[in-house]
Image (cartoon, rainbow, N blue to C red):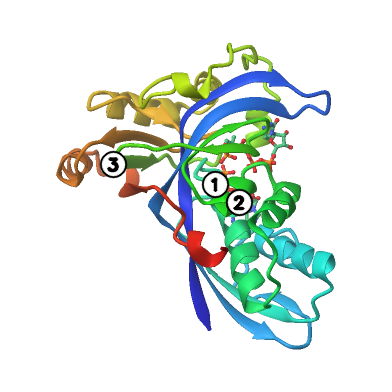
Amino acid sequence: MTTFPAPAKLNLFLHVVGRRPDGYHLLQTVFRFVDYGDSLSFTVRDDGVIRRVNPLPGLDPEQDLTVRAARLLQQETGCRLGADIFLEKRLPMGGGLGGGSSDAATVLLALNRLWDLNLSRQMLQELGLRLGADVPVFVFGESSFAEGVGEKLQPVVLPPAWYVVLVPSVAVSTVEIFTSRELTRDTKPIKMSDFSTGCGRNDLEPVVCRKYPQVAECLEWLKAFGDARMTGSGACVFAAFSSQEEANKVFSVKPAQMAGFVAKGLDRHPLYDFIS
Ligand SMILES: C[C@@](CO)(OP(=O)(O)O)[C@H](O)COP(=O)(O)OP(=O)(O)OC[C@H]1O[C@@H](n2ccc(N)nc2=O)[C@H](O)[C@@H]1O
Ligand SMILES: Nc1ncnc2c1ncn2[C@@H]1O[C@H](COP(=O)(O)OP(=O)(O)O)[C@@H](O)[C@H]1O
């Protein structure tokens, strides 16, 4: 059995700049990976069966993004191999940390290698986009300025940072927030060259805070220590610090009922070198 990481992402800012005719929203965001996440283990099977060894409670294994990613790879390549997939889940579902998307990307990257398929990064990004708007960036593998629905990616260089991430005890549905009437969809687009750390905001944040007071409460607490933001469609919130000591210090004084973790910002996905 071989084990592979599936890191979380943070959206350092997230602007909704428009809406496509199919209802999907046009975004501008910066994605950063952190050294905290799920991990996946695979045993290759020669009978073509894709099996989730430890299904997630409440989620039909056929709907699990790991299974959907593996089947998509089989369909597209005609590969006759299968896999047993074991998922060690650490990332909260509906947390805005991209857990499901990262799991799917790790399946694409790992099985591309374990099944000896040799698909290019571009090809895997395209397959990823069919699974979810957030999947391509995990295959792209670098901190990115993203546009479109999140699939138009340009690498960005970010300063070292340690993040305090708080995990409110609610799962936020991405669809619910994007379809909300109060969501503003007209933030003026910025140029990538205008981006600097700390710029912008998360346009989804006020909508989530109104619906989920636990998110507002975590944000308010963290704002006393830094520029706290929500990631993605929530529920998690984070603030950046320039040293691990500073981040640990803030984390150590959080109220006991607030869950969370401290993580280091990464420049690259740990599986970046899987594709040449
Ligand atoms: C908001 C973001 C920001 O990074 O992150 P999360 O909070 O999910 O982590 C992403 O855009 C989420 O991407 P992802 O979670 O892959 O979304 P998808 O499965 O493709 O879409 C779920 C639903 O969200 C809405 N959706 C998603 C992306 C987008 N750009 N516009 C949308 O309107 C659509 O209603 C879609 O049916
Ligand atoms: N392997 C998976 N891990 C997490 N969620 C999954 C997975 N497969 C499918 N999902 C579905 O995707 C939804 C979004 O999950 P997730 O990606 O963890 O959150 P977010 O999009 O807020 O970052 C979950 O509520 C769940 O229904």
The residue that mark 1 highlights is 98
Circles 1 and 3 in contact, beta carbons < 8 Å:
no
Judge by depth and name the residue closer to the eye, 161 or 210.
161
* Location of residue 235 with respect to 25 vertically, above or below: below
The residue that mark 3 highlights is 160
Q: In the rendered structure, which disc, 1 or 3, sits on the residue that comes first in sequence?
A: 1
Judged from the image, the quadrant occupied by ligand 1 is: top right
Give the percent coordinates (x, y) of residue 88.
Answer: 49, 67
The Cα–Cα distance between marks 2 and 3, rounded to whole angstroms, is: 24 Å
| Mark 3 nearby-residue class (10 Å; few <14, some 14–19, many ≥20) | few
Q: Residue 101 carries which label?
A: 2
In the current view of this chain or complex, which residue is farthest to the bottom?
A: 46
The Cα–Cα distance between marks 1 and 3, rounded to whole angstroms, is: 21 Å
Judge by depth and name the residue closer to the eye, 271 or 2.
271
Give the percent coordinates (x, y) of residue 24.
Answer: 74, 29
- What residue is drawn where x is 58% and y is 11%? 188
| Mark 2 nearby-residue class (10 Å; few <14, some 14–19, many ≥20) | many
Q: In which quarter of the image is the C terminus?
A: bottom right
Secondary structure category for the residue under label 2: helix
Drawn side of residue 137 relative to residue 197, left or right? right
Secondary structure category for the residue under label 3: loop
Q: Does the residue labelled 1 lie within 8 Å of ligand 1?
A: yes
Judge by depth and name the residue closer to the eye, 184 or 33.
33
Circles 2 and 1 in contact, beta carbons < 8 Å:
yes
Q: Which mark's residue is nearer the viewer, 1 or 3?
A: 3
- What residue is drawn where x is 41% and y is 25%? 216
